[in-house]
Amino acid sequence: MDKNTKILLNKSRSAEAVNVNTTLDFNIKNTNKPLPLNDIDTTLSQYEQFLKERKASTIYRFYGEINCIVSNPLYNENIKIGVEQPYESFDPELDIAPINPILTAKPIPGYDIFEKDGWVGYINDTPNEELELVGDNESSLCEFFPFDPGFDRLNMLDPDGKPNYMLKLTYPHSIDPNIKLVQGGAALNMGIPIITQLSLMFNGSNYVAFQTPINHGLQPNDTIKLYNFIDNTGGNLALPTREFPVFKLGDQNGNNTERIFILTIDPLDINFTLSSTFKRITQGVISQYYVRNFKALTFAYTDYDIYPAAFGVNYFNDNLAAFNFIQDIDVDGVVDNLGRPLSEIYLTIVKNDNDADITTKNAQYWLEQQANLPADIKDRFWTKIKGGFLTEKNTSLNYNIRAIGDPDYSSSIWYENIDESDNDFVGDIVEYNEAELLERRLEEVYHRINTIYRENLETIASSAGETLGNKNEGYIYRPHIKLQIREFSSVINPLLDLQTIFNQYTISDPAAQQEIKDDYEVPSYAQQPSPNVFRWRRLLEIGEIDPLGKGVDYPFESGAHYIHIDERFYWMRQDPPCDFYLTSKTIKIPSEKSTFQTLMKDPTFLDYGPRRTLDLNIIRKVPLVNILDYDGLVGLWSTGPQAYGPNVNKIAQCSNTNDPIETPPCFYNKKDALNHFFPPYAGSWGAGFSQALHEMLLTSTIRHEELQIDMRFIHFYGDYNLGKRDTAGACVNFNILDRKDITDDC
């Protein structure tokens, strides 16, 4: 010890003190590390670390683009809504209605209704001052405006800041096997029902065919079992025990293969009943049928951002919508309706009602029209959403999405009161077979929506003293878009019999049994045909592709999997009318001029002209039939106002015999009348008249009496009775009609 270091004992401090040993605890942990004197070289595989992190991650991030194919063929009314108010109290640029506005509705005649890029509307008849300032005079008079609902209620990207749709991420969560597709029939868990029996002949032999309301999911040579059929042979068909092979699909001409299947049974030997069903059999295992219900993983508009996609414009000049879910989705511990780890997530799109600024003049106008409706609907623009499937047309069916509003289906049921605030949705109808360990999707659910105005037009019109019928055709769309985040293997693992091992080695302890299951990597979702005997499909790792091409691979970055979505969203008509016929109504001018003016506003108005029968009522000696046949005349009909030149409205202004000569069609001078209706050589609608015919008519006697006019209308009709249709479906062939195009006016 250093001689300069001394220890001071306790007795040196006090006479009564006693020397004792004192123990002090101290930490010998070293926070510093000496630098190594030799080189250390460690090899790290970046790819192996990437695979390790990707395999361990259960975080997903979703982003992408939606190509929204929407239009407004089912508009409320063909009107231009305006405001009667001092200009200083109304800002047309903001389109905000002033306090206590006086709203006006100018009807747009049928011949001035145009379609542009799929949207139905009108050409502005008031110059746009902003466009005129830049010298674009043509565009200022040819600005297109769609009828309501328009861009602000239907586009995925909404210029008014009010979202038109809500996006959610959902997954299959539970099942419902108890729905009845046929009224009074069997539940879906009893099999797919039969709605029609057909008798077909192939190569001189008779075969029976059955039609199903939804896709049957069968292929030729599949085996099925029939339930609740009538055996007309007295039991020779052995229906309770026998299995039947599927001979062919489709009807006699091979049509409708997804809904019709053919069996090698004589049609006279069997009949179906209201409760008749079938089930597919694979390897002796009977399939199960049920509806899958989806549960939301995201819940609010704040869970994602949506904005215009860069350079994103589709064929119809609509902007593509880009979106990004800012909330990460962790699927750790989340299982599907079969108890398996999630292999699919769905992008669910739901139409909402609060999709427009209610202070605009258009929104205020429709609220005024609906003021006398019940309190629960008068302040809405859209009806509550209903759900169903694209079933066959049959009045005995439930859930036929295209039949909503048809009085023949008044006893049918649908999924009701669907809303964007819901977190549980009906997803689809599937078939599951334990021998295959796969779900096969048979039908997807569709949503249907209509405007409150169209669906309650009869009540609204009666309040105004008019008689109109409801327009029950609405819009439908497919709400769920499938996103495959994982794949199950194309092959089933060989049957694993652990019970034999447990019996051989007398292993009864549950913990010990579980340890052996873990050693064999038995997943929690494995099926057990019998106790401790397992079958399953392996869930492939991300980036793993099996020999049959099953598997997924997508970017992994910063601990998360990135799923890119590029899908189309179709906004469709419920029942597009593919057929039409022409109707006509004879109007007398001037006594029925108000009726004439009203009918001109009907969107189905096609054209008008002098009656084709007898005579023109202003020419006594020359019948119309002779005029049509004379000198190769091309006819008297034309479309819209061209029929009588620019003074089309004057045709309804003749109200008494004192009208001046200048107001057609009340003429006191033969020459004026003739020149108006039959100009020589060529004219507004009488092209083809020869000089000889003109002179002959000029020498004829003209009498003064009412002019009879035939007005023609197009009556569109579809498969269902949904009220008056104002626009045709895309399937209508208009080649036989002379229709005006938007380029004719602009």
Image: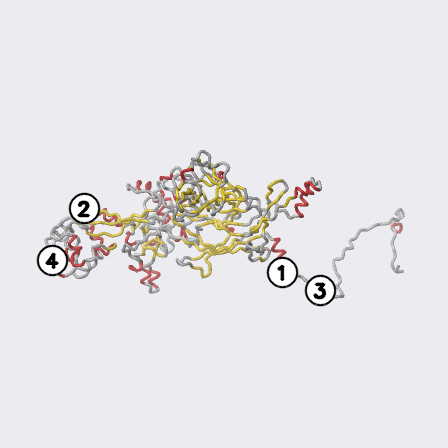
Task: Indicate whether 127 appears above or below 703.
Answer: below
Most foreground residue, 339 or 516: 516
* Res. 696 mark: 4
Count numbered badges in the picture. 4
For the residue pair 352 and 609, the one nearer the viewer reads as 609
Identify the image quadrant of residue 453.
top left
Residue 89 location, x and y as percent?
35, 52
Q: Nearer the viewer, residue 267 or 595?
A: 267
The secondary element bearing badge 2 is classed as loop
Q: Of helix, strand and loop, which one carries label 1? A: helix
Q: Mark 3 points at which residue?
A: 41
Could you tell which of marks 1 and 4 lies nearer the N-terminus? 1
Residue 453 visible from this viewpoint? no
Q: Judging from the image, what secondary structure is the residue with disc 4 in?
A: helix
Foreground: disc 1 or disc 2: 1
Discs 3/2, front: 3
Residue at the image position 64 percent from the left and 48 percent from the top? 521
Sequence-first tag of 3 and 1: 3
Q: Answer left or right for 487 relative to 370.
A: right
What residue does disc 2 label? 591
Give how far across and how far down residue 283 sits, in percent.
54, 44
Locate the C terminus by quadrant.
bottom left
Q: Distance between the residues labelled 3 and 2?
A: 106 Å
